[in-house]
Image (cartoon, helix red, strand yellow):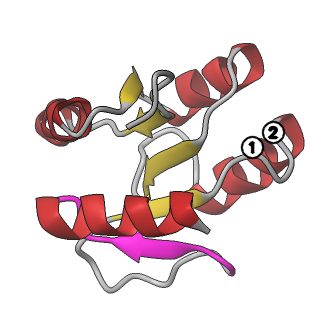
Amino acid sequence: MSACPLRILIVDDDERALIELEHLLETEGYSTVTAWSGREGLALSRKMQFDLILIDEQLADIEAATFLDTISHTQPGAVPLLVHSCSNRRRPAATEAVCKWEPGEVTARIRSFLAA
């Protein structure tokens, strides 16, 4: 990791998932910011710049597609977006998905996105 760690926003309304992802990514040397809802995540994206945003595809307050569309306007082209879940639900177009309960898969996918 460089002297300035990459900043990742984690948006999930599942407390256990949010805490585990935050711990995993900070252990990997990333700087993390967490949001308990989609609306909170959008508010944070208006205040800070992120290298990557992890968003749960089943937030209670906002659809993932709506979140992704809105975020593309607040940080256009600057943030690779990753929807994470273990379900087989239909995902918004042009998004990648990773199971949030598979730590090795999460970190590998993040490295891949950030290297691109």
Disc ID at residue 3:
none
Q: Is residue 56 above or below residue 109?
A: above
**In the rendered image, is residue 83 in sight?**
yes
Q: Residue at x 42, y 43 (%)?
A: 60
Q: Residue at x 27, y 58 (%)?
A: 107
Disc ID at residue 71:
1
98 magenta-colored: yes
Q: Give the quarter of the image for residue 110.
A: bottom left
- Overall secondary structure of the magenta section: loop
Q: Give the quarter of the image for residue 18.
A: top left
- 94, 112: nearer the viewer: 112
Q: CA distance from mark 1 to mark 2?
A: 6 Å
* Mark 2 element type: loop
Q: Is residue 91 above or below residue 27?
A: below
Task: Indicate the amino acid at tag 2.
Answer: Gln
Image side of residue 99 versus residue 112, left or right: left
- 2, 40: nearer the viewer: 2
Residue 82 drawn at (x, y percent): 50, 61
Residue 52 drawn at (x, y percent): 55, 46
